[in-house]
Amino acid sequence: MADETWTVKRILEWVEGYLAQHGDESPRVSAQWLVGEALGVSRMQLFLDAERPLTQDERAVLRDWTRRRGAGEPLQYITGETAFRHITVKVRKGVLIPRPETEVLVSEALSLLPAAPKPQDAHDDALLALAERLTAERSSEENDETTGIGAVSNDAHSEAVSDGAGGTSPDSPGNGAHGTEYGEGFIASSADSDAANSAQKAERSQLTVVDLCTGTGCIACSIAYEHPLTHVYATDIASEAVALAHENVCALDLQDRVEVLECDLGSGVPQDALGSIDLVISNPPYVPTEVMGRIPSEVAHFEPALALDGGPDGLDVFRRILAWSAEALAPGGALAVELHETCLDQAAELAREAGFADVRIARDLADRPRILTARK
């Protein structure tokens, strides 16, 4: 590659050819991924910039990355990050790479929680500002009356309401003497509504979630990112995973709502949380030991067996999660677990025997049974 002009188009062709010769099952996709990441552009931009020459540094990075990919190393470990739902998380050797199936797990889990509040729109903000203005004006009026200075006219109230709402209609408050009456009624109803909303938020703000076997923290971070009323405990027994999950939590600025704990399953979750948890979610080790011998070499040689091997029937860790969740969940609390496609029927039976209700099996993107959900 030395002493030659290497354009984006030419490097894509070279990387694809090299990977094809070294057994990559999707050499074109891998080439586009590597070159795009090395140049910091989207795959679409690669084709728009096809004739752009690469710098020496970019070529050096791609030589190293292509060699590593040719040796079978997963793309995510090479580039150091991967997209997961609405976030991007760091990944590295020693910690399981997030899979698309786990995005389905998060979707199923979120559907088991009370809906996240919708952001206030501009109209709500305008009404809130209007209520504050009217309250201040009315307070000023009452103060003036007690000191004999005089009162603010109804017309002034009408103007304030009309200006705050952005216009006047036959039913709007900006119509003559009714402005004051509407203003007072609006303030009262707004205050009552605010009090009710505050009470509802107080009731709904204590959604406690526990993510067992958190790995990169992708599940915990996604739930906290997508549902602002959740507080998540993310646990893992592997120190490498705990360190990486903490990095991802901080990178996403979620450290006020996601706590990463190094412990065996739920043993490190605060005792005062037990019995009041709203959701337990987990992507545990679940590959049956016999199947471990047939998993792709890319997985077997690079990803941690500790995060994969689920014992003879794939349910060793699931049984422990089930027992712990039965004690830790609040009445009506939910459980969502990703499992091997051969294990779901047996897992569902175990959940029913443990006293769980609403046991359900959801399928993954490839239409295979993958997720078990249930309620205490």
Image (cartoon, helix red, strand yellow):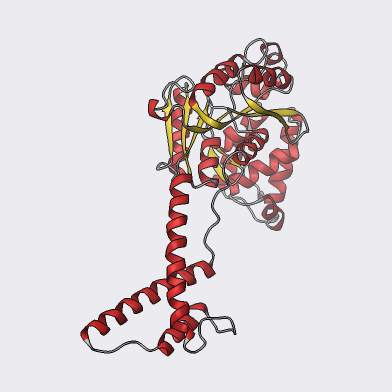
48 vs 370, nearest the viewer: 370
Image quadrant occupied by the N terminus? top right
Q: How many numbered discs sit on the rendered protein?
A: 0
For the C terminus, which image quadrant?
top right
Q: Is residue 308 above or below residue 184?
A: above
- Residue 15: tell me if it is visible: no
Return the residue nearer the eye: 32 or 4: 32
Residue 169 position by quadrant: bottom right
In the displayed structure image, the side of residue 121 where residue 191 appears, left or right: left
Instruction: Give the image quarter of residue 75.
Output: top right
Query: Is 304 in front, or is 1?
Result: 304
Q: Quadrant of residue 279?
A: top right
Q: Position of residue 372 (x, y in %)?
A: 66, 27
Q: Is residue 133 left or right of residue 114?
A: left
Q: Which residue is rendered at x = 38% and y = 28% of the image?
A: 272
Where residue 244 sits: x, y (%)? 47, 32
Q: Residue at x 39, y 76 (%)?
A: 133
Percent from the top left, x then y, of residue 93?
54, 27
Q: Is residue 360 left or right of residue 202?
A: right
* Extreme-left residue of the structure: 147
Question: Residue 86, percent across and down?
Answer: 59, 47
Q: Is residue 138 visible?
A: yes
